[in-house]
Image: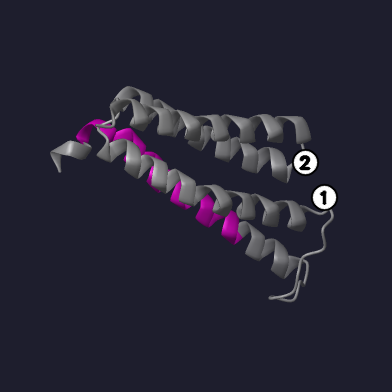
């Protein structure tokens, strides 16, 4: 699979993102158990509650992972510039990990900035793919 070699960092980011999202799932489950939350029932929408913030963090990650996979696939198959794609992938991961921590600790401004970083990184992935598409 020589064609993937220049994108090894991006592939690593996919794996790291997977384990990050897995960790978010475990945290939500543990917090739900500790709060004696009944599975299958909605979590009260209250930003003061860590269980709600952790659940929203996971939901937000789930909302963006499909976009990540589509754009990485498009960029790699378009033979995008590996430096641009790899750097965008790292920025996406840093943004998602930071978003998670800032959301858990209810640091609203930094959470929004971290979200914007990951959102912009996704856009850069698309542009990198588009610039090389033929």
Residue shown at 71%/45% (left/top)?
104
| Numbered label attached to residue 78 | none
Q: Secondary structure at mark 1?
A: loop
Tell which of 35 and 44 is nearer to you.
44
Whether the residues at callouts 2 and 1 have beta carbons within 8 Å, the answer is yes
Residue 28 lies, with reference to residue 17, above or below; the image says below
Horizontal and vertical percent position of residue 71:
40, 41
Residue 2, x across and y down, in percent: 14, 38
Q: Quadrant of the N terminus?
A: top left
- Residue 81 vs residue 15, the one in the foreground: 81
As drawn, the residue found furthest toward the front would be: 134
- Taking 61 as reference, is 104 left or right? right
What span is colored magenta in the figure? Answer: 5-26
Q: Is residue 120 above or below residue 38?
A: above
Sort mark 1 into few (<14), some (14-19) or many (20+) by Cα contacts within 10 Å: some
Q: Residue at x 49, y 49 (%)?
A: 65
Instruction: Give residue 110's position: percent from left, percent from top.
Output: 71, 30
Label of residue 47 in the image: 1
Considering depth in this image, is 110 or 79 the residue closer to the camera?
A: 79
Disc on the earlier residue, 2 or 1: 1
Res 106 label: 2
Q: How many marks?
A: 2
Residue 43: name its quadrant. bottom right
Q: Under tag 2, what secondary structure?
A: loop
């Amino acid at each position: 699979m020589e064609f993937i070699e220049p994108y090894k960092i991006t592939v690593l980011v996919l794996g790291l993102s997977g384990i990050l999202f897995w960790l978010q799932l475990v945290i939500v489950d543990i917090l739900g158990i500790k709060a004696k939350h009944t599975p299958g029932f909605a979590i009260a929408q209250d930003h003061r509650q860590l269980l709600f913030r952790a659940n929203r963090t996971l939901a937000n990650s789930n909302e963006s992972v499909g976009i990540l996979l589509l754009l990485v696939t498009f960029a790699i198959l378009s033979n995008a510039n590996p430096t641009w794609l790899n750097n965008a992938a790292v920025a996406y991961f840093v943004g998602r990990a930071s978003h998670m921590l800032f959301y858990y600790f209810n640091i609203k401004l930094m959470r929004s900035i971290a979200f914007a970083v990951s959102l912009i990184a996704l856009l850069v992935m698309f542009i990198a793919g588009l610039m090389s598409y033929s």
